[in-house]
Structure formats: structure tokens, C-alpha cells
Image (cartoon, grey):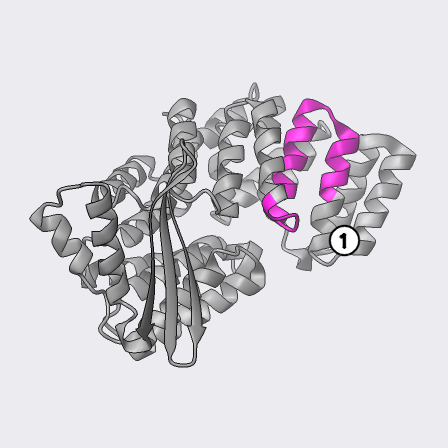
Amino acid sequence: MVTGRVARRGDAFLVSAELTDVGRDSQLWGESYSKKLADIQGIQEEISKSIAENLRIELSGKEQQQIAKKDTQNPEAYQLYLRGRYYWNQRTPEGVKKGLDYFEQAIEKDPGYALAYAGVADSYAVGGGTYLKLTSKESRPKARAAALKALELDDSLAEAHTNLADTYLYYDWDFAKSDQEFQKAIALNPNYPTAHQWYSECLYVTGRFDESIAEAKRALELDPLSVAINGSLGAAYFYARKYDLAIDQFKKTLEMDPNSIAAHRELYWTYVIKGMYPEAVAEWQAATRISGQAANAAAAGDAFQKSGYRGFLKADLDRIQKNPQANVPDYSVARLHALLGQTNDAFASLEKSYAAREGSIVYLKSDPVMDPLRSDPRFQDLLRRVNLQL
């Protein structure tokens, strides 16, 4: 495993990198570098060559070219891109917005910077209703346009192929094309963690659970400190109905970042399916408090104490219906109706989700929360329209 740290002192950067044998818990190689801002990009090539030498890897001519390749000659653009990735990886509303801003600034500095366009695409891909408060119909075309621009500049860019695959998955509902683009991205860069992470989602959406878990684990091997990737392995377990493994993984994710709203929410749904309602409500409250809604969290706790889990669900549904500006996805509303046994209302919400082209509707085939609806002919009809009758 490769780890490293970067610190800035005036106009210089101090970079340290280590290569560790995780199995033996021993350091194979370590080095520190001090570079001026203008030389920072050259460190990538230097570190890559040192790792290859220490692992005694013979690099092909093509691999040597990839190491030497510079995506931009503008050091300021490069710095802005790195900042964008730092904030994007936080997966918070503030982080995704800041990340998008830095990516756009990088493009201003270098309009031919393909990686920066890929960063813009990734911002719109993850930043729909949750982070950027955009609908799928607003965010996904922006993601596609930025990914295609990146590929126009550099067709070998795994990041851009990964994003295009994600758009095929969540917006076009073209699962065959999505699979092809993910495989292309991984072939171009087998060590790009997000390609494996997002491909895992494509696989569990289409019911290929063992492959999905394997891809999520590969992503985690490549980036073990990513909160988002740790959570993705938990999601792969959840959709594969390996609930105990999912619970353990979400707990590990929350140990890394107790403020991960996504991990709290996914753990909530896992507890719901397990019938562990006190634990579920506690996770829902945690996510709600972190998102700045302490009053709603307290009210939910009161509803659960007075009327049990069914009362909690009704109170949550009532809150959503009285507060349309909360922008809760219709798919999430359908989940609540399904749990309450309100079948017609559940399908009404699913139809709204379908019409809005919500990305989350692709979970329909694999989502255990939707099990009460599966025997209804309307469910099979919806699967057909979302291209999930594979």
C-alpha cells in the first residue's frame, strides 16, 4: 500500500511517500521530497519510478509513457485540481460545492485540462439532490457533457470513462453500456479506486452480487482510507442481503467518520430490514442531527417512543409531505409507503421517481425494502421500463 503526506511551506512543497507491505506490516520503501510549486507535478513520475524499482517491476514503454505523462503544464491548474479532489472526496454539501469550484478554476487556468473536466463531471455525478440540490435531469446532463469534453481531450482518461459509465447507469438506465464503460476504465487504469467502487454499484443494481462485493473490496484495497469507498462495500453487502456484514462495514465506516450522513442512513436501512427498530431510529436521528435538523431528530424519537416504529414511519412521512422544499427523492418516499403496507401510494411515488428520472430508481430490482411490492404486476412493469428485466 502507498501512503503519503503533502505540506506547503511558502512557495515549496514537502512530499513524503511510503510503500508498505500490509500483510507483513513492514515498510518496503520511503522517501521525502522538497519541490517548488512549479516542479510539483514531476514528483508523481519520480515516486512512481521509485516504487517500480523497489518492487522490481519492469515497466513497458507504454507504462513509462503513462508515468511521464503530464495532464497540464500549468502548476496552478494542477494545484486547483488537487484541492478539488480533496474536497470532492469529503462527500459533504460544502465539500462537493468547493470541489466543483476548484475544478472550474483549474479549467479557467488551463482550458485543455482533461482531468479537471472529469472532476466537474464527478461533482455533478455525486452532487445531485443530496449535495448540489439539483434534480437528476439537471445534474446528469452536466456530468455527461463534462465527461465527454474530458474524453475529447484525452480518450485514455479512466476517470472520464468511469463518469460516463455512471451516467449510463443512473440516468440512461443502459446497463450494458455502463458495464462496457466501467470495464474500459478499469482496463485503462486498474488502480483507479472509483472505477471499481462505482462498477460495484452497477453490479449490485443488476443482481450480480458476488462480483459487486469483489469490486468493492478491490476499491477498498486501493484506497482503504476513503470513507465513501468503505461505505460502498457496506452497500454491496446490503443489496446482497448479507446484513450482518453490512452492519459491521457501516460501523467501520462510522469509526473513520462519525459524521458520515450516508453511512448513518445506510446503517438505518440495514437495521430496518433486520427488524432492529431502536437501533434503526437512533441511526436516523444521528443522520438528521448531522444534517442540521435537531428538532426533527427529537420529534422522531418522541414518535417512536409513543407509537413504535410504525408511528415513527408515519411521522416521517407526514413531515415530508408537509415540507416539499425538503426535496426528498420520490424513491425514498416509496420506500416508506412500502414499509407501511401502503401499496398504491408506493407505486404512485415510484411513478413520480420514474418520471423525474431519479437515479435511485435503479435500485428497484435489488432493494430488499421493496420486497413487499414484488408480487404486484405493476412492479414487473416498472422493472421492464427501467430496463431491469435482465
- Percent position (x, y) of residue 333? 65, 41
Quadrant in which residue 5 is drawn: bottom left
Quadrant in which residue 254 is drawn: top right
The residue at the far left in this view is 61
Near-viewer residue (215 or 180) = 215
Query: Which quadrant of the figure contains the C terminus?
Result: top left
Q: From this view, report whether residue 9 is shown above or below residue 294.
A: below
Q: Is residue 335 visible?
A: no
Q: Disc 1 on helix, strand or loop? A: helix
Is residue 289 a member of the stretch shown in magenta? no
Query: Which quadrant of the figure contains the N terminus?
Result: top left
Q: From this view, report whether residue 384 is shown above or below residue 71.
A: above
Please give left or right for residue 253 compared with residue 23 in the image: right
Please give left or right for residue 70 compared with residue 130 in the image: left
The residue at the far top in this view is 375
Going 30% across and 53% down the picture, which residue do you hit?
Answer: 159
Three-letter code, disc 1 = Lys
Instruction: Please name the residue that numbered disc 1 is placed on.
Output: 322
Is residue 269 a member of the stretch shown in magenta? yes
The residue at the far bottom in this view is 10
Q: Residues within 10 Å of mark 1 (few under 14, many from 20)?
A: few
Please give left or right for residue 351 compared with residue 259 in the image: left
- Percent position (x, y) of residue 222? 38, 42
Please, what is the dominant secondary structure of the magenta stretch?
helix
Q: Which residues are magenta?
A: 256-284
Going 55% across and 58% down the picture, which residue do you hit?
Answer: 131
Q: Is residue 362 visible?
A: yes
- Percent position (x, y) of residue 139? 44, 59
- Percent position (x, y) of residue 382? 48, 32
Near-viewer residue (295 or 263) = 263
Quadrant in which residue 174 is drawn: top left
Going 40% across and 42% down the picture, which residue do you hit?
Answer: 198
